[in-house]
Image (cartoon, helix red, strand yellow):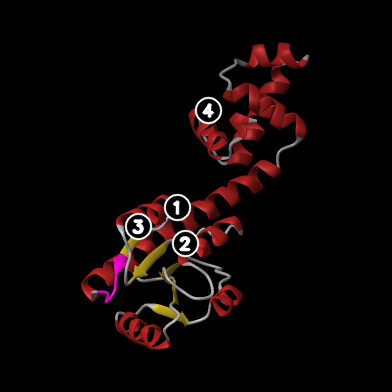
Amino acid sequence: MNPTAGIVYLLDDEPEMVKAISRLLRAKRFDVRGFSSVNAFLEACQPEGPACLVLDVSMPELDGLELQRRLTRQGILIPIVFLTGHGDIPMSVRAIKAGATDFLTKPVDAALLIPAVSAALQVARSRWKDDAEVKALEEQEAALTAREREVMRHVVAGELNKQIALALGTGEQNIKQHRANIMKKMGVESVADLVRVTERLGLTRR
């Protein structure tokens, strides 16, 4: 995969800064969408694939850290590289704790910005891949019958077929058939794999 694959959103209230950073990133073959208005950015930021955000901390419309919180509340978990002309250590710590991937000072050095953006996009790609895999697993789990889900809960708890049959008041042969159906529908070949899948889906916590 192209190491710069994905969209780089850029938000800074200084149009000249947006122009300069956009030019720099495009020279490195990044797909850049630049904005100098928070509202324009919010209207456009609907990622349908991996994306990151290069964000100025201090803006008149909305503080960068508050925008980070707003995006999180809206479920837009986009990796953020913060830029600031007067940042301090406590501010950078808050940003990183809230999920930012880096915090750079202006005037930003290209030697720092390019790797920071590349790293943010790598985080975005990994997150996007993980989300796609979980969605596929959720679709597979949705294909199970109510009885198969019931049997699966017992299987991942480590119970033997005879124990499950006794608990559910049915024959052991029925449990064997349900178990085979579960393994096929969930795309796994072992109980260990099934346990990992159910843990990833959060089913073991229900």
Query: What amino acid does circle 1 point to?
Result: Ala
Q: Nearer the viewer, residue 33 or 148?
A: 33
Q: Which mark is residue 65?
A: 2
Residue 103 on image: x %, y %: 33, 62
Q: Read off the residue under disc 1.
A: 98
Q: Read off the residue under disc 3.
A: 92
User: Which is more N-terminal, label 4 or label 1?
Assistant: 1
Q: Which mark is residue 191?
A: 4
* Left-right relation of 113 to 134: left
Q: Label 4 near label 2: C-beta < 8 Å?
A: no
Q: Which quadrant is home to the C terminus?
A: top right
User: Which is more N-terminal, label 4 or label 2?
Assistant: 2
User: Which is more N-terminal, label 3 or label 4?
Assistant: 3
Mark 2 neighbour density, 10 Å: few (under 14) some (14–19) many (20 or more)? many
Query: What amino acid does circle 3 point to?
Result: Ser
Q: Secondary structure at mark 1?
A: loop
Residue 9's place in the image compared with 140, above or below, is below
Mark 4 neighbour density, 10 Å: few (under 14) some (14–19) many (20 or more)? some
Q: Which callout, 2 or 4, points to the residue nearer the camera?
A: 2
Q: Which residues are magenta?
A: 104-108
Q: Which quadrant is home to the N terminus?
A: bottom left
The dominant secondary structure in magenta is loop
Question: How far apart in space, not on screen, are marks 2 and 1 (Cα)?
Answer: 9 Å
Name which residue lies at 55% across and 62% down. 71
Q: Which callout, 1 or 3, points to the residue nearer the camera?
A: 3
Query: What amino acid does circle 4 point to?
Result: Val
User: Which is more N-terminal, label 1 or label 2?
Assistant: 2
Question: How far apart in space, not on screen, are marks 2 and 4 (Cα)?
Answer: 44 Å
